[in-house]
Image (tube, helix red, strand yellow):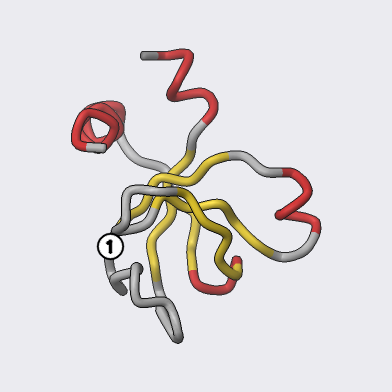
Amino acid sequence: MARVRSKVGFALCIDNTDAEDLERGKVYLTRPDASAKREGYVRVVDESGEDYLYPESYFVPVELPEKAKDALLAAG
């Protein structure tokens, strides 16, 4: 699991304007995407269960305790 954890991050949704598959106040799994980041986007696994690009301004990156990371990764 440490291998998967190193490739993902977590972000809190603070805006869901025109994004039906996002819930404000929810923490989402993010995946690295250097080209999207250069364009101001972040790759997020949304409510559909798939990863999509959303504006970075919709999220705040968060650091979570290991126990919380494990729980979110197990749920996803």
Q: Position of residue 4 (x, y in %)?
A: 45, 20
> Is residue 40 found left or right of 64 in the rendered image?
right
Number of marks drawn? 1
Q: Residue furthest bottom?
A: 17
Q: Nearer the viewer, residue 58 or 61?
A: 58
Judge whether 7 appears above or below 54 on screen. above
What residue is drawn where x is 43% and y is 24%? 5
Judge whether 63 appears above or below 6 on screen. below
Judge whether 62 appears above or below 68 on screen. below
Q: Nearer the viewer, residue 70 or 66?
A: 70
Q: Position of residue 35 (x, y in %)?
A: 78, 49
Residue on which the image places disc 1: 26
Query: On the image, which quarter does residue 13 sit in?
Result: bottom left
| Quadrant location, the N terminus | top left
Label 1, secondary structure: give it.
Answer: loop
Q: Amino acid at mark 1?
A: Lys
Q: Position of residue 44 (x, y in %)?
A: 47, 53
Q: Label 1 crowding class (10 Å Cα cut-off): few <14, some 14-19, many 20+?
A: few
What residue is drawn where x is 72% and y is 54%? 37
Q: Position of residue 41 (x, y in %)?
A: 65, 62
Query: On the image, which quarter does residue 25 sit in?
Result: bottom left
| Quadrant location, the C terminus | top left
> Is residue 39 found left or right of 11 in the rendered image?
right
